[in-house]
Amino acid sequence: MQGRILKGVGGFYYVDTPEGVVCCRARGIFRKEGIKPLVGDMAAISLTHSDDVEGSIDEILPRKNSIIRPEAANIDQALMVFACAEPEPSTVLIDRFLIYFESLDIPRVLIFNKSDLAEDERAEELRTAYAGSGAEIRVICAKEADVREELLPLTEGKMSVLAGPSGVGKSTILNLLCPDAAATTGDISGKLKRGKHTTRHSELFTIGTGSYICDTPGFTAFELRNITAAELRDYYEEFRPYDGKCRFDDCSHTDEPDCAVRSAGDSGEIPQIRYGDYRTIYRELKERRSF
C-alpha cells in the first residue's frame, strides 16, 4: 500500500492512503541510513494491526524535491503569505522567500493578506513592486466571503506549502481552504493522548482529492545558505532585460560604473523596493563569505 505522509509526531507518522489514514511507525533501517520521513513524502507501508489501522513505513519513494525549513517534500508550489499591514511586511524577507523557492524550482504564489487594514495605495504599491518577480501575486482580505473561491483553484491537484511569518493570517487561510483541519488535528491528538495542535511542526491537510496544503510554523528570518553573492542577480527577473548592457560582464549591479541595472533601479524602471533589497541581500551574502 502507498500513501502520502500527512504528519509526524513523537515517532508516529500519519499516512493518507486510498484505504484511509494509517498511523505508522518508521522501520529502524531509516534511522540507521540517516533517512528522515518528511511531510509530503510518498511512502510504501504495510499494515501491522488491521483492527486499529496501524502500520509500518517500509520505504520512502523517490522525492522530486524537499526543503529543510519547513521540513517537507514533493512540493508543487509555495503559497507565501504576508500582510499588507499589521504586521508591516519585511520586503527583504519576501525576497528571501522568493529566491529560496525559485532556487528549488518551486512555483511561487505571493499572497498579501489584510488588504482591509492598508491604504489602497499601499496594497497597489506591493502588487506593483513584485509584478515582475516571476511569482503570481494575489492581494486579499481573508475575512471576505469570496476569498475561498479565489484561492481554492490555486490548490487543485497540488501539494502546496503555506509559508510566511507569524501574524499574517496563515491559519485563517488554512481554515478557509480546509474547514476540517481543526477536527482532523483533534482526532490525531486524541489518539496520541497529546495536547491540541500548535503549529510547531509541518503538517499536511487534505483539501480535496489529490490536493494538499502544508501548514508550517511561522518564522521571521532565515538565511539563503544555498545562494552566493555572485549568483544572486540571477534570481531577479526584473534584471534580465538589462543583460549585456552593463560595462562589465560580471557586474554585481551594486557600485560598478555604467551599470544598467543600477541606473534602472535609481530611476524606478526597476521597482526601488526590489533593487534596494537586492543590494541589502547582496551585502549580507558578501559578508557571510568573508568569515
Image (tube, rainbow, N blue to C red):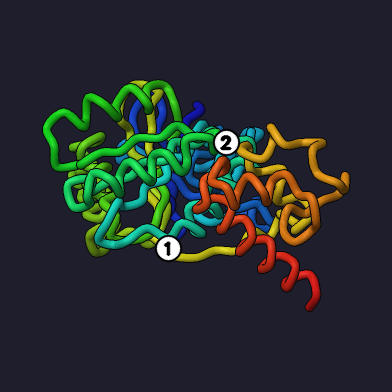
In the image, 160 versus 124, the foreground residue is: 124
In the image, 174 versus 247, the foreground residue is: 247
* Residue found 33% across the figure and 41% down from its top: 124
Q: How many marks?
A: 2
- Amino acid type shown at disc 2: Ile
- The quadrant of the image that shows the C terminus is bottom right
Above or below: residue 11 compared with residue 287: above
* Residue found 22% across the figure and 51% down from its top: 118
Mark 2 touches mark 1? (CB < 8 Å): no
Q: Tell me residue 170's x, y (percent).
A: 30, 49
Mark with earlier residue (2, 1): 2
Looking at the image, can residue 258 be seen? yes
Looking at the image, can residue 45 be seen? no
Above or below: residue 97 compared with residue 200: above
State the SS at label 2.
loop
**Cα gap from disc 2 to disc 1, whole angstroms:** 19 Å
Q: Which residue is mark 2?
A: 106
Q: Is residue 103 left or right of residue 114?
A: right
Q: Is residue 95 left or right of residue 255?
A: left
Q: Tell me residue 15's x, y (percent).
A: 42, 38
Q: Which residue is mark 1?
A: 219
Q: Tell me residue 216's x, y (percent).
A: 40, 52
State the SS at label 1.
loop
* Residue found 41% across the figure and 57% down from its top: 201
